Amino acid sequence: MAELQSAAEMKASEDVIAAIVDRVVNRLEPAPETLHTASLCLIDALACALGSLQDTQIQHLLGPYCPGTVVPNGARVPGTSFVLDPIKAAFDTSVLIRWLDISDTSPVGGHPSDNIGAILAAGDYVSRIRMSEGHQALTVRDILRAMVDAYEIHCSLAAANRFDRPDIGLDHVIYVKIASAAVTCRLMGGDAQQIKAAVSNAWLDGQGLNAYRHVPNAGARKGWAGGNAASRGLLMAWLAMRGEKGAPQPLSAPVWGFNDVFLNGDAVKMATPLGTFFMDNVIFKLVPAQRNCSTAIEAAIRLHAWYSEHKDQVARVRIVTHDEAIRRVTKTGPLPNREARDHCIQYMVAVALLRGRLELQDYTDEAASDPAIDQLRERITVEESPDYTADHHDLTKRSCANSVEIITHGGQASPRIEILYPIGDALRRSEAAPMLREKFFSMTAHLWNRQRQDRILGLLADMPRLLETPVTDFMSEISEAQER
């Protein structure tokens, strides 16, 4: 009986791969509202990518591995003149999108927009090859459909498994690799067997450790891990298209399969059915803060005036939050770099209270040298609310609640500011729309003049025209010589 159960469990685990393949092969047609949300994700990703080009610390990661390499019909990288092999273009584009940590996220965490680099690179390369052979290019409709599929696969795996738990320790970019392998194989014309091969090899591929998101190992790799996963996913798809076979039991094979190696025998699961829930409920980052503490930052900004009036009497700042924030972003002790600071709820709340805002420059060494920040950090307490935790993990509620309250030495308390959903959440989309536009303008202004900004944003906002735009034309528009 035990052997029969074991066989059933193995089949259920491999059915996860079958579900992914079925979704990508038999793609559902997203509703117009879903495609519109995907276009907003594309706008946001483009803003993030171009904004990252201002950071000199990213430059050594970009461009061909061998200087001077020429790739006929290669894939372009937004905001640059690079024409690269699509696997490196996927790396560069997704790194640019993710680098500043203000790209979109989801109710279950991670950054599904990490997949966009692989999708754009595959779409551009395939389209240029097709046109060189006298065929039509893919359109942006194909890009947006692939994004919907990738977001759903990525986030459904994240919701059901949480591989970045401390007892497992893998980085969440594993979801990027699996999703990118599936959807890019489809974009390149792969059939069900080729997509299955790509996905199975992505599961067998080496997986990143979550260590580089935590002190003492927190560092720049946090910014390029998503790009690495996207490019690896595209590589698995590329190999499948060249005839590389998949594996029959990458998850459930005894001893050596993913389940036994990483999950102590538990099975990989998939939150089903695979619809459009996660694209429809994507969360845009409009404050540069880790998702789990974004509402705490908003609450602290609202308390800035009260704090300023009572700063000499402050005894304690009380943050009430959910378990994910406790686990991921509650940190004490030294914060040696930007990557450590932007994952520390005490640091971010302290800055917001002191300055009435939180911006990218607040994570620099210069900004962090202000002794008032660490002095205030020492007076911040973080505690869990069971109700916040329950609502955070309940996908029918998907809250990201935090509350902040200030208490003086004399016992006076500030208003307790509680915020359940960040401003970029689907429930606050009307508030977010004008802020997304402003984010686009501010982050692209160093490369594009206002005329070009208006032209590109106008295309992205005109859904009928955008959906029929050839991918090659779109990539040319966002990657040609820059105008200032």
Image (cartoon, grey):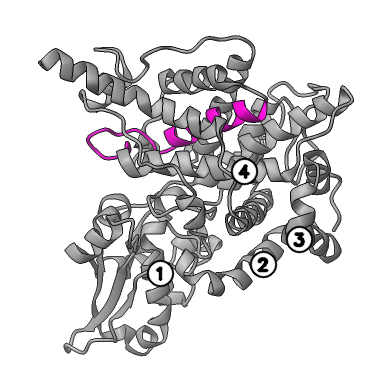
Image location (x, y in percent) of residue 374:
34, 64
In the picture, the quarter occupied by the N terminus is top left
Disc 1 is placed on an element classified as helix
Q: Nearer the viewer, mark 2 or mark 3?
A: 3
Mark 4 vs mark 3: which is more N-terminal? 4
In the displayed structure, 129 sits above or below 256; it is below
Q: Nearer the viewer, mark 1 or mark 4?
A: 4
* Residue 75 counted in the magenta span: no
Question: Could you classify mark 1 by the number of other residues whose Cα lies within 10 Å: few (under 14), some (14-19), or many (20 or more)?
Answer: many
In the picture, the quarter occupied by the C terminus is bottom right
Identified by mark 3, the residue type is Asp
Disc 3 is placed on an element classified as loop
The answer to whether marks 3 and 1 mark residues whose Cβ atoms lie closer than 8 Å is no
Residue under label 4, please give it.
145
Magenta residues span: 162-188
Residue under label 1, please give it.
297
Q: Residue furthest left?
A: 1
Question: Could you classify mark 2 by the number of other residues whose Cα lies within 10 Å: few (under 14), some (14-19), or many (20 or more)?
Answer: some
* Spatial CA span between label 1 and label 2: 21 Å
Mark linked to residue 233 = none
Q: Is residue 153 left or right of residue 391?
A: right
Q: Nearer the viewer, mark 2 or mark 4?
A: 4
Residue under label 3, please give it.
462
Disc 2 is placed on an element classified as helix
Question: Could you classify mark 4 by the number of other residues whose Cα lies within 10 Å: few (under 14), some (14-19), or many (20 or more)?
Answer: some
Residue under label 2, please give it.
437
